[in-house]
Amino acid sequence: MPALAAAGDCPDGVVESLRVSDAFGEIPPPDYPMNVVAETCKVWPYDTDRLLVAVAYSTDESFAGNRSLHIRVAMFDAGDHRFLAGYARREEEDAGFELSERSLSLDTARYDLAPGIRAFGVIVDSVASGPSCPEHSSDHELSLFVVQGQQLRPVLAQDLYAWAPVEGDSCRWSMGRTVSDSAQITLAMADESHAGYRDIRLTAKITRYTNEPDRDGTERTRSEHRLLRYDGRRYRPVGDDDVFWLGSPGSPEWRDVQ
């Protein structure tokens, strides 16, 4: 199970220090609009001398749902709050992606990839309503990071929730039979290792919803599993990857600290 940090809980000065840090290849001027949209901080249980930080900043004065965002993940010294390592990405909000003040969380479960190497996770939750008739939807994007010198390197991106239509027209569910699947995904470390890191086992608990006009809907659950192996750069699925819940489609690339 994920071990999540609550939104907020950041020491004084840390969020502003991350905003003006030159580690990301750019130093915003004092009047540059980088307003805080979401933030979360947590002392890392694996190494209590380290503070984990994730912050989303808006880089314009637009309204929620239409903002340009910088999402920055960093590791600080827990004592003197010195910046130690970081990673970042840009996002554009739209009908399918929007952040609230509680959209970021830190996952400090025991992702022990190798002896002496533990990853930590950042979960990004969108609050956008999304399109009214989607062909697919997913959320709760988990990214796992490992510390590599002055960088935090992402090795996995996996949505923890996914939904997909199976049969019928999801826009006209009251007029005909519709079937859809939703999945809740969990991670567990496997015993075998490849390219120096342990495999990761994904389990999807899938609920199939069937709706028919003039009848009560029905639900059936099943579980599916997939194995992820590290290829020296990132985790990739073994075998069949043509399942609606696997991966994080459309996820933008995280970019290195300069």
Image (spheres, helix red, strand yellow):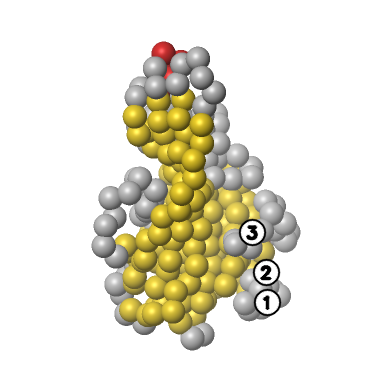
Residue 204, given in percent of the width and then of the height, sits at 46, 53
Disc 1 marks a residue whose amino acid type is: Thr
Above or below, 90 relative to 131: below
Residue 123 visible from this viewpoint: yes
Above or below, 83 relative to 11: below
Of the two numbered discs 3 and 2 on the same chain, state the one appearing first in sequence.
3
Question: Which residue is at a point 39% across and 17% down the rendered structure image?
Answer: 176
**Dot 1 crowding, Cα within 10 Å, few <14, some 14–19, many 20+:** few
Picture quadrant where residue 136 is located: top left
Whole-angstrom CA distance, mark 3 to mark 2, is: 11 Å
Judged from the image, the secondary structure of the residue bearing numbered disc 3 is loop
Whole-angstrom CA distance, mark 2 to mark 1, is: 6 Å
- Asked if the residues shown at circle 3 and circle 1 are in contact, with their CB atoms under 8 angstroms apart, the answer is no
Residue 111, given in percent of the width and then of the height, sits at 52, 72
Above or below, 118 relative to 211: below
Q: Quadrant of the N terminus?
A: bottom right
Q: Which mark is residue 48?
A: 1
Of the two numbered discs 3 and 1 on the same chain, state the one appearing first in sequence.
3
Task: Give the residue furthest to the front.
Answer: 215
Between disc 3 and disc 2, the foreground one is 3
**Dot 3 crowding, Cα within 10 Å, few <14, some 14–19, many 20+:** some
Q: Quadrant of the C terminus?
A: bottom left
**Residue under pointer 2:** 43
Disc 2 marks a residue whose amino acid type is: Val
Whole-angstrom CA distance, mark 3 to mark 1, is: 16 Å
Question: Which residue is at a point 64% across and 71% down the rendered structure image?
Answer: 44
- Asked if the residues shown at circle 2 and circle 1 are in contact, with their CB atoms under 8 angstroms apart, the answer is yes
Question: Which residue is at a point 44% across and 79% down the rendered structure image?
Answer: 191
Q: Which mark is residue 4?
A: 3
